[in-house]
Amino acid sequence: MTQRLVIPSREEVDSEHPLTHPWWQFSARFNVAVTQSIPVARMHSQESEGVMMRWGLARKTPQGDIALSSREAVSRDAVQTAEALRTQWQHGQRGIVPLAGFYLWQRTAAGHAQPYYVRLVNRPVFGIAALWDRVESEEGDVLESCVLITVDANPLLAEIDNMTRRMPVILPREKYETWLSGSVSDATQLLVAYPHTAMVCHPVGPHVNHLEFQDSSLIRPVTLDPEL
């Protein structure tokens, strides 16, 4: 499962997601990790808006504090059955995270994890399905956060991510409105693997493993050593 994201520029995202209220403020980033802030499109008062949220769903503890999570994703099954997610799912707290691409790691025969960059064919920006929540502590602190939704990987990504064989739910552009404002039944139908024929990937260098690196060189293809 992906643990690092590539966020496009706001100009590119605004073209892909024509929202009523694009409140979000962000720039292109090439190495975004869980616990960081990411853009999320959602519905609010029957209007679409773009906001920034913490990646990693937070919850309110019995003591009234906010408990943070570093869990980057939940499965399709968990979305529908887990007690901790039932409210968000049933109440339509669904969001779309706009991406340019994401990284996966392949366990090689030599035992090390080789990173790959994954993107879509002819879609420089695409949307990932997410659930979001808003929690408020007893002291009045408010935090909005989200978690990505995953399904079993398609053949291409299952070969790359040979450790978890999971992939995020990638939404067809024409289904954005259905995901954000459709019924639970209609949204459930979208929780499927994106066709592998519409995706491409290539190996990248190890610098993506370190968050201090954030430039576009991270997605540059590299040639692998056949003995590794």
Image (spheres, helix red, strand yellow):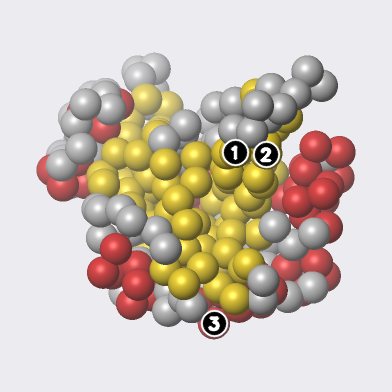
Residue bearing mark 2 = 135
> Between tags 3 and 2, which lies in front?
2
Give residue 210's position: percent from left, percent from top: 26, 24
Give me the C-alpha separation between circle 1 and circle 2: 6 Å
Could you tell me which quadrant the C terminus lies in?
top left
Task: Name the residue located 70 percent from the left edge and 57 percent from the top edge.
Answer: 93
Residue bearing mark 3 = 174
Q: Amino acid at mark 1?
A: Val
**With respect to residue 56, does 183 lie above or below?**
below
- The answer to whether one can see residue 99 in this image is yes
Task: Name the residue located 65 percent from the left edge and 45 percent from the top edge.
Answer: 134
Say whether residue 60 is left or right of residue 195.
Answer: right
Residue bearing mark 1 = 142
Circle nearer the N terminus (1, 3): 1
Task: Name the residue located 32 percent from the left edge and 35 percent from the top edge.
Answer: 115
**Callout 1 secondary element:** strand
Residue 13 found in image quarter: bottom left
Give residue 89's position: percent from left, percent from top: 77, 54
Give me the C-alpha separation between circle 3 and circle 2: 31 Å
Say whether residue 66 is left or right of residue 161.
Answer: right
Task: Tell me if mark 2 has few (under 14), some (14-19) or many (20+) residues whose alpha carbon lies within 10 angstroms of its own.
Answer: some
Nearer to us in this view, 48 or 102 = 48
Q: Which mark is residue 25?
A: none
Q: Amino acid at mark 3?
A: Glu
Say whether residue 65 is left or right of residue 38.
Answer: right
**Callout 3 secondary element:** helix
Give residue 39's position: percent from left, percent from top: 43, 54
Q: Amino acid at mark 2?
A: Val
Circle nearer the N terminus (3, 2): 2
- The answer to whether one can see residue 124 in this image is no
- The answer to whether marks 1 and 2 mark residues whose Cβ atoms lie closer than 8 Å is yes
